[in-house]
Every structure is written in structure tokens, then in C-alpha cells.
Amino acid sequence: MTGIVVEGLNKSFGSFRAVADVSFEAEEGKITAILGPSGSGKSTVLRMIAGLERPDTGRISLAGEEQTNAPVQERRVGFVFQHYALFRHMTVRQNVAFGLRVRKVGKDETVKRVDELLRLVQLAPWADRYPDQLSGGQRQRVALARALAPRPTVLLLDEPFGALDARVRQDLRRWLDDLHSELGVTSLLVTHDQEEALELANEVVVMHQGRVEQVGTPDDVYNRPATRFVAGFVGAANVLEGRMDGGRVRVADGWTSGDGGDDLAEGVRVHAYVRPHQISIAGEQTRLGSTSAVIERITNLGWASKLRLRLTDGQDLTADVSNDELPVPPVGEGDRVHLDLRNAKVFEVEDRPGHYAGVGANGAAPESADGGSAEPAIVA
Ligand code: ATP
């Protein structure tokens, strides 16, 4: 493996264990994302890989070489932080040339490399401007060019677009994707934004409370979550309380269909994670197994409608239904409809201390000793 290999990394600050037994591999030439909520240890992992923080235990190898305790300047990593760390008194060109100057690269070669990078990040016309004459998005492109100039073997990106507004983030994401296709440098991207991770990364490492919950492709973590934390954090999901009944998952007056639960005992309480767009709605009961609900509210989003629904046992859920798929004749607020709760991911509700208690509105799973009593929630 010549990309990034991290094995059994641990890091505590005082008595607080910020990173616990983290292992993963980031494939050469690909983008790997570390995705997790605030405080999950993502940046600490990245900082250890960069050599800015020393692990308590564990191993790090970069491009096939063990580098666990190597000083930063020997690691050949490029680093881009959320907050532009450009030198304010230097022009764009001087900023990009900085790493080459430090490494005493010759003048002609420096000019050639800087021109090449300014073209790549589409900033050639701004070469002689100072950072405070640029937009936030342009400054991050300069930061990226500066990180790439010395031809790092790995590029580490810590929430590089975090401080920018949604529209600029979107543009930069597309731009980074193109740039990466052209350069193919092994990249590790830290983000708490699941869309960013799913869109850009070939592989995603999902972290929570210092630990790795799952490593997989975007398709794996979205469609085959390994844990209930991943099921709730990656993509919106309704969390419905149910129980095993005759080998199936009963929710209110009906059933879900999907994965998990097959080996659970009769009567076991479960949480079924059902995505809003994986609920289909019929005005009349069309198939055995559908669950009935009353429409509380319909919001038309143009191409689709968002429905707030209440099950017969009082649980609320949200469905996103394309307007072409709404029942005919039309249904309205207060009407009873039948739902097909497809593709549910089912996890046992455990009363074990330390097990995840459920997933809150921001996707962060509160750790609680009282794992079984958490209210089902809708995860946005
Ligand atoms: P964010 O997205 O908010 O940056 P993160 O997932 O990157 O979060 P880290 O920055 O790695 O999380 O921090 C993980 C935990 O370790 C946090 O609780 C943080 O407060 C703690 N921590 C990080 N660095 C230090 C430090 N130098 N001293 C003490 N605690 C620290």
C-alpha cells in the first residue's frame, strides 16, 4: 500500500481520549474523506498524519515509508486548513512560491512551477494581487496551489471549504474534483459535511467519539451502514421505533422492508432507519405490509413534496415524494394514507451501558447509559 496507512492510532489530551484505535488505509491517487461530527477526532488524526501532533501509540506510513515520528518537514505532505493561512504581505505568486523557496528550488524552476499551478487553479490573472484583494474561494485556491507546489506525496485538507458560503463550497467542490482528476495526488479530506464526503471521496472513513465507525465507499456508508450511528449521520433518516414480530419488523400497524433484524429474537425492540425518499405513498392499501399514517402537513418543493406524517402509534416521520409519485386521486392534509417503508436499516435497541443511545437532530449520537429509552428521532 503506497498511499496512507494508519494503524492503531491513539491520542489522549490529559485524561480525554480524543482518538481511539484508529486504523484505515487511504489509497494512492484517490480522495479519502474522514467524515464525522464536531469533536469526533478527525482533525487530530489529520494532524498526526501531518506530523503536527504526536500519537501516543500507533503507526503512520506515507507512500510506503514509516513516518510515525518523522518531523513535519520530512513528510512531504501538503496541508490546507479551513482558515486561510496565506501570508498577507506576499502576493499570490509569492505565496505559491513559498514552499519552493524554503526548499531552495532554483529560480527558473520555481517560476515554471508557480505558473503551472496558477493556471491549474485558474488564478493566473490574480498573480500579483495580495490575499486581502481576493474572495474567500480564491484564497483557498491559492492555499491549495501553495500546498501542491513542492509536489507533496499526500495532500491533507482540513475542512478546506468550511468557512465559505454554500454556493462557493459547491463550486469549489466541483473544481477540486477536476483538479484531483488531473493531478491524482493521494488526498485525505476532513469534513463534517456528508454531501461533500459522498460527492468527492472514493472512500469514506466515518468517525464518532474518537473511533472509526465504518470505512467504505460512499455507496457502502450510505446504503449499507455498519452501525446505527452511520445510519443516522450519513444521509437523512427517520428513526422509527419497532419490534421483531414473526421474523419481520413491525412499526405501528404495519411493517418495514429492508436489511437487518433477520437474526434478532421475537419481541426484541428495534430502531428502523428509513430515508425520507425511500418511503412510497398510496391512497389505498395496495400491498400487504404497508403501514398507515395521517398526513399532518404537505410542503410542495416544486418537483417533489415533503410530507409530515403520523403513524397510528403517534410516531412522526417525514417522506420526500416526487410529485409524479403522489397518489391519484390527490391526497391532502388530514387524509389517511398507506406507506411502504422501504430499505429500512434495522438495529437492535440495546440497554447496554455505553451503547449509542440514538441519533439527535444534528446527527450526533448522544452517548448514554440508557440506550433503550431514547426517543426515536428524525435525523435531518
Ligand atoms: P471539529 O470538526 O470541530 O474540528 P474534530 O472531529 O476535528 O472536530 P478534533 O479537533 O480532532 O475533532 O478534536 C477531538 C477532541 O479532542 C475534541 O473534544 C477536542 O476538544 C479535543 N482536543 C483536540 N485538540 C486538543 C488539545 N490540543 N488539547 C486538548 N484537547 C484537544
Image (tube, helix red, strand yellow):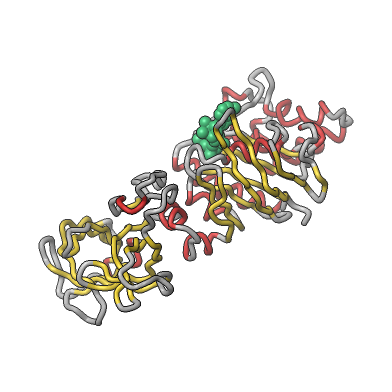
Q: Nearer the viewer, residue 108 or 283?
A: 283
Quarter of image, res 125: top right
Residue at 54% across, 59% down: 218
Between residues 55 and 203, which one lies in front from this camera angle? 55
323 horizontally vs 71: left or right: left
**Residue positioned 81% across, 51% down in the render:** 64
Q: Is residue 169 visible?
A: yes
Where 251 sits versus 62, above or below? below
| Residue at the far top in the pictured view | 89
As rendered, which of 3 and 169 lies closer to the eye?
3
Name the image quarter holding the N terminus.
Answer: bottom right
Left or right: 124 with respect to 152? left
Between 329 and 50, the residue placed more toward the observer is: 50
Q: Is residue 274 visible?
A: no
Residue 294 coordinates in the image, percent (x, y): 15, 64
* Residue at the far front in the pictured view: 352
**Horizontal and vertical percent position of residue 186:** 71, 50
Q: Is residue 129 above or below residue 35?
A: above
Name the residue located 24 percent from the left edge and 75 percent from the top edge: 290
Name the residue at the bottom extreme: 287
Total labels drawn: 0
